[in-house]
Image (cartoon, rainbow, N blue to C red):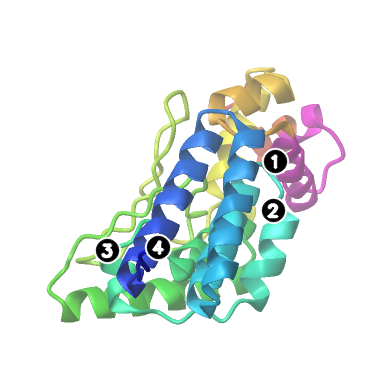
């Protein structure tokens, strides 16, 4: 029986292919299939006994977890991960742990998380510029939260799904530190949409909608949807009813 040696590049390509398959399955609303593919990914990475491949598998698992609406679990990884930024990782492969870490920190939206994400993205920008690679588009279901301005040359673009409200171009803090996603949800509350309808329009889970609602209520100092809309109108965040 012939022995076939798999190069490091081939192994990394196989891991990336499985990560791409898992992401595709999740975006096609097939979470069980995505979870099974992630298990295959971990099996392959563990068999390789390569720590870098295992870290990519964890990164992919976290990305799937985030898409499934479990921000708390994704944040556990993002806060504990020590992702090394590698040129090839950024320029070639689909699943990049530093970028996934940035996605999760941005989705969290806290000042500390956004600052950490900004530092990661600035370092990614520097490496890209050194390679004369000026465009790096980050596709994600989260938004920048209005706190991170895109760099001058490297474009960090958060792709919004069809049906989502328009991008807000202003940088800096939004009223009462509401993120763009929270403002989107506020607008939909004003239109009297229910959580399931909001989740469908924004391509997120109802769990994630509830997570954002909790933060909206805290930031506005209210206890329910109607009061949130009224307070937002008083503050000029939403137009008067």
Kindly report which numbered mark, 3 or 1, lies closer to the viewer in this rendering.
3
Secondary structure under the numbered disc 3 in the rendered image = loop
Alpha carbon separation for disc pair 1 and 4? 52 Å
Q: Residue 96 placed where, x, y %?
A: 42, 65
The residues colored magenta run: 207-228
Query: Which quadrant would the N terminus be assigned to in this image?
Result: bottom left
Q: Which residue is mark 1?
A: 208
Q: Is residue 5 above or below residue 225?
A: below
Indicate which disc, 3 or 4, sits on the residue closer to the N terminus. 4
Residue count near mark 3 (Cα–Cα under 10 Å), binned few <14, some 14–19, many ≥20: few
Kindly report which numbered mark, 3 or 2, lies closer to the viewer in this rendering.
3
Q: Which residue is mark 4?
A: 1
Alpha carbon separation for disc pair 2 and 4? 47 Å
Q: Would residue 116 appear left or right of 213 to someone viewing this image?
A: left
Indicate which disc, 1 or 4, sits on the residue closer to the N terminus. 4
Alpha carbon separation for disc pair 2 and 1? 8 Å
Indicate which disc, 3 or 2, sits on the residue closer to the N terminus. 2
Query: Which quadrant would the C terminus be assigned to in this image?
Result: top right
Quarter assignment of residue 33: top right
Kindly report which numbered mark, 2 or 4, lies closer to the viewer in this rendering.
4
Q: Residue at 53% of width from left, 53% of height from top?
A: 174
Residue count near mark 1 (Cα–Cα under 10 Å), binned few <14, some 14–19, many ≥20: some
Q: Would residue 47 appear left or right of 72 to someone viewing this image?
A: left
């Amino acid at each position: 029986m012939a022995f076939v040696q798999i190069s490091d590049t081939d192994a990394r390509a196989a891991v990336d292919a499985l990560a791409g398959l898992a992401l595709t399955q999740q975006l096609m609303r097939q979470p069980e299939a995505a979870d099974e593919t992630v298990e295959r990914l971990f099996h392959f990475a563990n068999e390789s006994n390569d720590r870098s491949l295992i870290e990519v598998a964890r990164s992919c698992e976290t990305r799937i977890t985030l898409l499934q609406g479990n921000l708390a679990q994704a944040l556990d990884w993002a806060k504990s991960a020590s992702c090394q930024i590698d040129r090839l990782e950024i320029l070639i492969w689909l699943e990049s742990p530093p970028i996934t870490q940035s996605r999760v920190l941005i989705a969290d939206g806290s000042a500390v998380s956004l600052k950490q994400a900004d530092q990661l993205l600035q370092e990614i920008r520097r490496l890209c510029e050194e390679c004369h690679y000026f465009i790096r588009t980050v596709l994600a279901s989260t938004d920048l939260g209005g706190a991170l301005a895109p760099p001058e040359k490297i474009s960090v673009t958060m792709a919004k799904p069809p049906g989502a409200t328009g991008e807000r171009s202003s940088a800096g803090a939004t009223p009462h530190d509401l993120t763009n996603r929270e403002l989107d949800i506020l607008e939909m509350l004003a239109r009297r949409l229910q959580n399931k309808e909001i989740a469908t329009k924004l391509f997120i889970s109802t769990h994630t909608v509830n997570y954002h609602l909790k933060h909206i209520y805290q930031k506005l100092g209210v206890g329910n949807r109607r009061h949130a809309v009224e307070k937002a109108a008083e503050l000029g965040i939403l137009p008067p009813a």
